[in-house]
Image: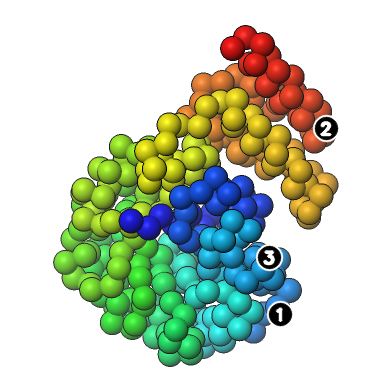
Amino acid sequence: MQIVLAPMEGVVDHLMREMLTQIGGYDLCVTEFIRIVDQRLPARVFHRICPELQQGGKTLAGTPVRVQLLGQEPHWLAENAVRAVELGSPGVDLNFGCPAKAVNKSRGGAVLLKQTEQLYQIVKAVRDAVPVEYPVSAKIRLGYDDTSLTLANAEAICAAGASSLAVHARTKSDGYRPPAYWPWIAKIKQHVDIPLIANGEIWSAADAALCQQQSHCQDIMLGRGALAMPNLAQTIKQQQAVMPWPQVLQLLMHYSEFEITGDKGKYYANRVKQWFSYLKLQYPQAACLFKQLRLLTKSTDILTLLTYTLQQQKTSA
Ligand SMILES: Cc1cc2nc3c(=O)[nH]c(=O)nc-3n(C[C@H](O)[C@H](O)[C@H](O)COP(=O)(O)O)c2cc1C
């Protein structure tokens, strides 16, 4: 089975990809989306979103990182897809699932799920432009408001030559509300002959097994669950135990070392708090510690609190 780390704009950036792929279990990462409107973007935009391009399109742990594009113009998406692979991306992923209002208003993301023909034209243009040895994948939701076009959309993407299709098994209107409708992926599978990747609501190894069973899909993509449990992929692949809380604390401290290369002064403080919002879902200790951490704005203060908490854990163990 293959496990893909889901693209998560504003959450899973190159530093998070570095941390999570070092822990292991991921076969592929997809970057946050790059918005394409009506021009060929300069290399620096690709390098900002995907610094891994400068190290062979892989994280330091060796996991390939594929650039994701979001837009509505086949021609400009194709131009930028070519640029992405020229810069070293091992393929290109196309985002047809983003629910953000601003993005949908300008006809990008999930709103394209209402326009099957446009989906086809986009995938075809990108596939025709990108050298055949590079995969062109797509990521969809089940639909915009409903599932009336789910199968037609998947068929169009497949007919246009996509190499694989990740399916977030909810409509745009479903937002992120559980459940994810995994059996829908099994239905799609009967209509397309490209590899599918099942995505949505996988928080544990048991969820992964149930998802595989209901979606008839071996390959899965992990989003929020990967942040809630940093070794989720390894609990699925290697039957590892859930990472113990003291080890998570160490990981959070290790994350602070990345600040030097981060692009904003408040990077660590902001990102670590955001990470806590996911960790709280898995670790009761995180909810408790977050109450103290919430008010801290300096990395050094956060680090002191984490060090103190870890020492206390060790003493009481
Ligand atoms: C904060 C956030 C940012 C996201 N950004 C992207 C993105 O840039 N591109 C994309 O295709 N999906 C994006 N997604 C959707 C995820 O890739 C994934 O499909 C979704 O979270 C469902 O998987 P999960 O239940 O495992 O989290 C985002 C989701 C979240 C919560």
Q: Amino acid at mark 1?
A: Pro
Where is residue 155 drawn, in percent x and y?
25, 75
Q: Residue at coordinates 44% horizontally, 45% vertically from top-left?
A: 233
Please tell me how crowded label 3 is: few (under 14), some (14-19), or many (20+) other residues with Cα within 10 Å.
some
The residue singled out by tag 1 in the image is 42
- Mark 2 or mark 1: whose residue is earlier in sequence: 1
Where is residue 22 drawn, in percent x and y?
58, 49
Q: Residue at coordinates 37% horizontally, 62% vertically from top-left?
A: 166
Element at label 2: helix
Q: Residue at coordinates 56% horizontally, 21% vertically from top-left?
A: 285
Marks 2/1: CA distance? Answer: 36 Å
Q: Amino acid at mark 2?
A: Thr
Marks 2/3: CA distance? Answer: 26 Å
**Dots 2, 1 in contact, CB < 8 A:** no
Is residue 316 found left or right of 234 in the rendered image?
right
Task: Please tell me whether residue 173 is drawn above or below residue 113 in the rendered image.
Answer: above
The residue singled out by tag 2 in the image is 300
Is residue 120 found left or right of 66 in the rendered image?
left
